Image (cartoon, rainbow, N blue to C red):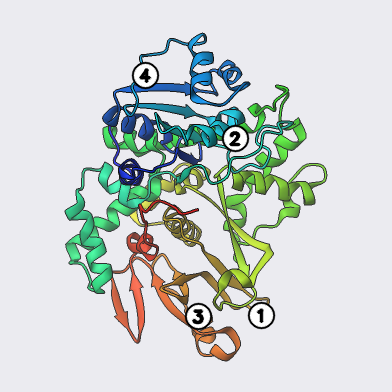
């Protein structure tokens, strides 16, 4: 099954730029990087040279010498059959390039030759020192980069067979601040509950589209999550020794397993000292940083005051932790949770899931989010910069109390000027200057752009 992804549009712009640099696609494992890259290559090039450094670590030897294209091609030709290369019609695909730092470095040299195109993918490129004991310098300014994440709701709708016209109904309603018809709202709400159960890992989405079976799809998401955790122990350094000892692996696993526990608490704040293992306080922070750098979790920090610029007011040691894909979190919960989601009969845990779902939506659009909580009891689910303004996002499954938001908005001299957007299981509406949107519109709070990044 072919999945339409945002990266397809990004690649089109990349290829059309006559001065394009090599492309670097980074992101969590199983997010669809390799599939999308190979499909693009097959549709746009006559010759593809595919190197997978995870499956073939011996290929790294070809990059030990000079890093010009001719030398690399000569060295590779004795390790694998090489097709006849055609200038301007050949692309080199470097898969799992984090396993070969010198292949990544070579992009700095070959970009100037302009004979072939180069696309690299990597799953651990956010990890500082992803190959331990390797002193290869990191190339700077030699690539265009795309941060690939599991499918967002818009991509999920494409996978379900909806076209741009049907998907645009959501955007048009959001931009015009006009409610959808009752029928459309009901349909998109049902589709969004499916997405909440399934998440965005391509394999899981494809299985659901093919079988319409939530249970078998959930098992796929759980298996992917286990595979991601297994990677903690499989990671190796340049000397081929494990990156982490058994205690460190246990700490990373413990840090991950505690996510639903803390999200189920009233204030949802993650407490690092609860991570099990020796030296848990400091090492636990390292475990969370590793999970963040590998794209498995999001840290959402508390603010000292919800005033712009928000990043200036970040409290670094206070944060909530969410999985980067809602499917992972649902898979960590007990069987039967998906049935309750689909039927709309979730119990007390619905607040946790819907807040995590909004974090999923905002993260996958590249948005930065914060929250605000004080010992006095004031608490805001999320705070974002929306259209240049500090904006409170109040997330509810159905309805709820806006006391904290009203208090903060009533005292701009103390908390800064803020505005409020409510996100709940209602149709879009505006009342008393407050915008209410359904959960399935949350991704539109941040605009995804295919524009190539600048240096």
- For label 2, the residue is 229
Query: Given the current orientation, which residue lies at the most extreme right position?
Result: 279
Which of these two is toward me, 392 or 47?
47
Which of these two is toward me, 21 or 407?
21
Q: Residues within 10 Å of mark 1 (few under 14, many from 20)?
A: few
Badges 4 and 2: C-beta atoms under 8 Å apart? no
- For label 4, the residue is 85
What secondary structure is marked by label 2?
helix
Q: Residues within 10 Å of mark 3 (few under 14, many from 20)?
A: many
Gap between marks 4 and 2, in whole Å?
39 Å
Query: Which image quadrant is residue 175 in?
Result: bottom left
What is the x, y in percent for residue 21? Answer: 44, 41
- Say whether disc 4 or disc 3 marks the residue closer to the N-terminus: 4
What is the x, y in percent for residue 10? Answer: 35, 46
Placement of 167 over or under 30, stated as above or below: below
Q: Residue at (67%, 27%) from the top-left corner?
A: 236
Query: Which image quadrant is residue 133 in?
Result: top right
- The numbered mark at residue 405 is 3
- Say whether disc 2 or disc 3 marks the residue closer to the N-terminus: 2
Q: Residues within 10 Å of mark 2 (few under 14, many from 20)?
A: some
What secondary structure is marked by label 3?
helix
Badges 2 and 3: C-beta atoms under 8 Å apart? no
Placement of 307 over or under 441, stated as above or below: below
- For label 1, the residue is 376
What secondary structure is marked by label 1?
loop
What is the x, y in percent for residue 42? Answer: 30, 27
């Amino acid at each position: 099954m072919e999945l339409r992804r945002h990266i397809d549009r990004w690649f089109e712009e990349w290829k059309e730029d006559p001065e394009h640099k090599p492309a670097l696609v980074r992101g969590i494992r199983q997010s669809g990087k390799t599939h999308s890259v190979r499909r693009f290559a097959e549709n746009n090039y006559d010759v593809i040279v595919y190197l997978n450094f995870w499956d073939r670590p011996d290929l790294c030897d070809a990059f030990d010498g000079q890093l010009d294209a001719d030398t690399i091609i000569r060295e590779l030709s004795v390790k694998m059959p090489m097709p006849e290369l055609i200038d301007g019609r050949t692309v080199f695909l470097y898969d799992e390039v984090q396993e070969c730092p010198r292949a990544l470095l070579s992009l700095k040299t070959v970009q100037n030759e302009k004979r072939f195109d180069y696309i690299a993918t990597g799953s651990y490129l956010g990890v500082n020192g992803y190959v331990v004991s390797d002193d290869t310098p990191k190339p700077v300014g030699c690539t265009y980069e795309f941060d690939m994440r599991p499918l967002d709701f818009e991509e999920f709708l494409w996978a379900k067979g909806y076209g741009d016209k049907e998907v645009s109904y959501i955007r048009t309603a959001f931009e015009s601040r006009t409610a959808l018809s009752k029928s459309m709202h009901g349909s998109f709400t049902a589709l969004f509950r499916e997405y909440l159960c399934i998440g965005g890992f391509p394999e899981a989405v494809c299985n659901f589209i093919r079988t319409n079976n939530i249970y078998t799809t959930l098992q796929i998401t759980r298996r992917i999550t286990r595979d991601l955790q297994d990677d903690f122990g499989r990671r190796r350094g340049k000397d081929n020794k494990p990156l982490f000892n058994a205690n460190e692996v246990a700490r990373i696993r413990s840090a991950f397993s505690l996510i639903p526990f803390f999200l189920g608490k009233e204030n949802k704040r993650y407490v690092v000292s609860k991570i099990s293992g020796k030296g848990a306080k400091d090492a636990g922070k390292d475990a969370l940083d590793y999970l963040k750098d590998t794209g498995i979790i999001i840290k959402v920090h508390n603010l000292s005051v919800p005033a712009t610029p928000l990043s200036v007011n970040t409290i670094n040691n206070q944060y909530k932790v969410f999985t980067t894909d809602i499917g992972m979190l649902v898979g960590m919960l007990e069987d039967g949770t998906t049935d309750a989601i689909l039927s709309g009969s979730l119990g007390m845990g619905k607040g946790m899931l819907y807040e995590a779902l909004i974090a999923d939506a905002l993260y996958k659009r590249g948005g930065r989010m914060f929250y605000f909580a004080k010992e006095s009891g004031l608490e805001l689910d999320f705070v974002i910069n929306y259209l240049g303004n500090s904006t409170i996002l109040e997330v509810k499954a159905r309805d709820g109390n806006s006391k904290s938001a009203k208090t903060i908005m009533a005292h701009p001299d103390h908390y800064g000027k803020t505005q409020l957007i409510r996100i709940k299981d209602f149709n879009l509406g505006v009342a008393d200057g407050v915008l209410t949107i359904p959960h399935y519109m949350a991704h539109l709070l941040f605009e995804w752009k295919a524009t190539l990044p600048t240096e």
